[in-house]
Amino acid sequence: MPARDLTRYGERTTAAEVVDGLDLTGRTAIVTGAASGIGVETSRALAGAGARVTLAVRDVDAGRRVADDIARTTGTEAPAVIELHLDRPASVEACTAAWSGPLDVLVANAGIMDAPESYTPAGWESHFATNHLGHFALALGLHDALAASGSARIVSVSSSGHGGSPVVFDDLFFRRRRYEPGLAYGQSKTANVLFAVAAGRRWAADGITANALMPGGIWTGLQKHWDPEVLAATKLAAADAVKSPEQGAATSVLLATAPELDGVTGRYFEDCHEAAVVERIEDGLHGVLPWALDPDQADRLWDVSVALLDAEARSRG
């Protein structure tokens, strides 16, 4: 299926160019993982256009440094900073409990990639816990604030890495199969898209849209677990396709703000356009696989995720 041409932007557009001319005064936004990489540039663009941005970060000191830098470079008030550990449900609950008033934009940006095998106290594999379940719990906890906006947008940062694996419901946490970082990452990125599909259907009546995206090939701290020689060789081979963090943040900012996307929901974007549905991601960067947009799989993931969060909450009493 070909991609739909919904915007005038492209693969080299920057986040600042997306919001050029937009006035987001009075709009509120939360950006997770906003202390590094494209999270910084997503936050900078939103704040620069007038939005009141909250940086949800693991390292509060790093978050404050970013907030100060955003204030300096945009001439706006420094964004708020809140501590958030997505792999700790109690931390997510504290974050949602601390929020008051309507929320217009939630950018689920934080994530880990190709990390060594590890598990949360609940027994959840770290990629699935951080990249999907933490953001899922955050969105559920903020649902009423999003609904109060009347026109809220959820932006789920996925990756072409979703092509590495569907969601393996029979073995989400690698209890019966050998752990492979790429499969764990791929599964979690597929889950990011399926979440947008399900939320887009379930919450449309609440005035909430949800879309997923591939930011592009960007070198950030996300690749910290890669073998240094592999990383160096990949950087050399992919030099022409690499985006800057400012370009990588553009599609996130587009989904968060673009007037032409009002009412658009449950889709997957790349390079500031809706992606084509493909049977295989040939170049490692472009296209979305059918398994990531399957509404039945999206509903199944939603139900499984709710059950996992409920069980974890009961275990804490």
Image (spheres, rainbow, N blue to C red):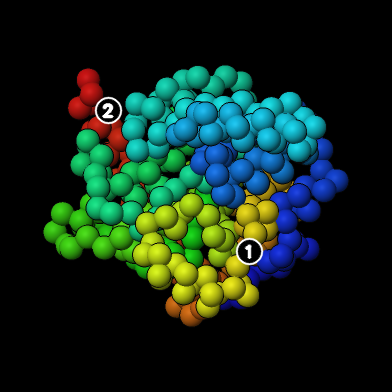
Residue visible at 59% across and 73% down in the picture = 239
Residue 197 locus on image (x, y percent): 49, 53
- In space, the residues marked 1 and 2 are separated at their CA atoms by 40 Å
Q: Quadrant of the C terminus?
A: top left
Image check: 136 left or right of 212?
left
The first of marks 1 and 2 along the sequence is 1
In this picture, is 138 found above or below 10? above
Q: Which mark is residue 243?
A: 1
Residue at the far left: name it: 176
Image check: 275 left or right of 227?
right
> Are circles 1 and 2 on residues that touch, CB within 8 Å?
no
Q: Secondary structure at mark 1?
A: loop
Q: Is residue 129 visible?
A: yes
Type of the residue with mark 1: Lys
Residue at the far bottom: name it: 282
Q: Circle 2 is placed at which residue position? A: 313
Residue visible at 28% across and 54% down in the picture = 116
Q: Is residue 191 visible?
A: no
Image check: 98 left or right of 167?
right
Quadrant of res 230:
bottom left
Q: Quadrant of the N terminus?
A: bottom right
Q: Secondary structure at mark 2?
A: helix
Type of the residue with mark 2: Ala
